[in-house]
Amino acid sequence: MKKPETFLNFNNGVLAVPNATKEFCDILWTPHPAFEGVELKHLITAADTDGQFSYHLVKIAPNKSILNHVHEKQLETHEVIGGSGTCINAGQNILYEPGTISIMSAGIEHEVIANDDGLYLFAKFIPALA
């Protein structure tokens, strides 16, 4: 699976805030605990923001998916930074291609399915995932 340039830029990026930096290349990828073929890189965690928000890179292998689920307390956004697929958001199919942004309000069912080229997302949660 060829990794897109925008994804690589985020994967090797940096959080730059006054008096501190955090190199994203130093953060390990972890398998998603529930969905096969999905990996996560937790860029900014609840511990970094006192629970206010969290940012994550998401890699979905070709033809794999994040099955239907709900975040009861978090608003979630996806910014597609590589690959392609489909998001089923509140029962509606949304084409996922680079440049697409999708928003799932708290309590909304959603599912993400990668196409043959895989899918790369920059996901944000407000408040943070625990």
Image (cartoon, helix red, strand yellow):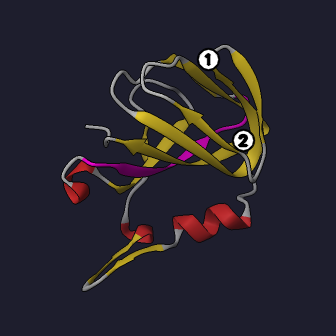
Can residue 38 be seen from the camera position used here? yes
**Residue at position x 29%, y 52% in the image:** 45
- For the residue labelled by badge 2, is the local secondary structure a helix, a strand or a loop? strand
Residue 109 relative to residue 41: left or right: right
- Mark 2 against mark 1, which lies toward the viewer? 1
* Amino acid at the residue labelled 2: Gly
In front of the other: 23 or 124: 124
Which residue, as the protein is rendered here, is positioned at the far bottom? Answer: 19
Pinpoint residue 63: horizontal percent, then vertical percent. Answer: 73, 29
Mark carried by residue 33? none
**Residue at position x 76%, y 34% in the image:** 85
Q: Quadrant of residue 32?
A: top left
Q: Quadrant of the C terminus?
A: top left
Badge 2 density bin: few <14, some 14–19, many ≥20, Cα 10 Å: many
Q: Which residues are magenta?
A: 52-63
Residue 112 relative to residue 4: left or right: left
Pinpoint residue 47: horizontal percent, then vertical percent. Answer: 20, 53
**Residue at position x 33%, y 49% in the image:** 53
Pinpoint residue 118: horizontal percent, then vertical percent. Answer: 72, 41
Mark carried by residue 118? 2
* Amino acid at the residue labelled 1: Ala
